[in-house]
Image: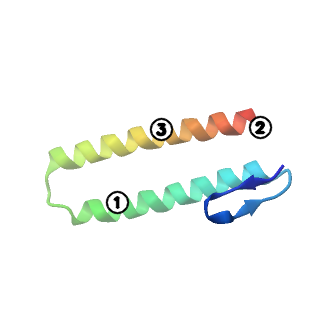
Amino acid sequence: MDVSLEGGAKLHGDDSVDSLMKTKLHVASEVEATMNEKLLELPNDKTLLTKLAQEEAENMTINNARCLDFYQEK
């Protein structure tokens, strides 16, 4: 099975889904690290920080569920 990614990149063979999941997890950890750095630059507004953290947690939960659904379908 071949999987095409945005930007034209392709994954080939039986390991396509596993490679895609590993890539997704790597990107998610990079995004989380960047987000944490940016949060440290914000004013110390606990209400805003709490709201941002809750939104990010919800987004990651949704994204992980979508990836799990995709992975289980394959």
- Look at 48% across and 37% down and name the residue there: 62
Distance Cα–Cα, label 3 vs label 2: 20 Å
Secondary structure under the numbered disc 3 in the rendered image: helix
Q: Position of residue 51 (x, y in %)?
A: 24, 42
- Look at 42% across and 62% down and name the residue there: 33
Q: How many marks?
A: 3
Q: Which mark is residue 74?
A: 2
Q: Residues within 10 Å of mark 3 (few under 14, many from 20)?
A: few
Secondary structure under the numbered disc 1 in the rendered image: helix
Can you identify the residue that label 3 sits on? 61
Please tell me whether residue 18 is drawn above or below residue 30 in the rendered image: above
Which is more N-terminal, label 1 or label 3? 1
Using residue 27 as the reference point, say whether residue 2 is left or right of it.
right
Q: Nearer the viewer, residue 49 or 71?
A: 71
- The colour scheme used here is rainbow
Which is more N-terminal, label 2 or label 3? 3
For the C terminus, give its image quadrant.
top right
Q: Nearer the viewer, mark 3 or mark 2?
A: 2
- Look at 67% across and 38% down and name the residue there: 70
Can you identify the residue that label 1 sits on? 36
Using residue 74 as the reference point, say whether residue 27 is left or right of it.
left
Q: Quadrant of residue 10?
A: bottom right
Which is more N-terminal, label 2 or label 1? 1
Q: Position of residue 7 (x, y in %)?
A: 62, 64
Distance Cα–Cα, label 1 vs label 2: 33 Å
Q: Nearer the viewer, residue 37 or 62?
A: 62
Please tell me whether residue 31 is drawn above or below residue 17 in the rendered image: below
Q: Nearer the viewer, residue 5 or 14?
A: 5
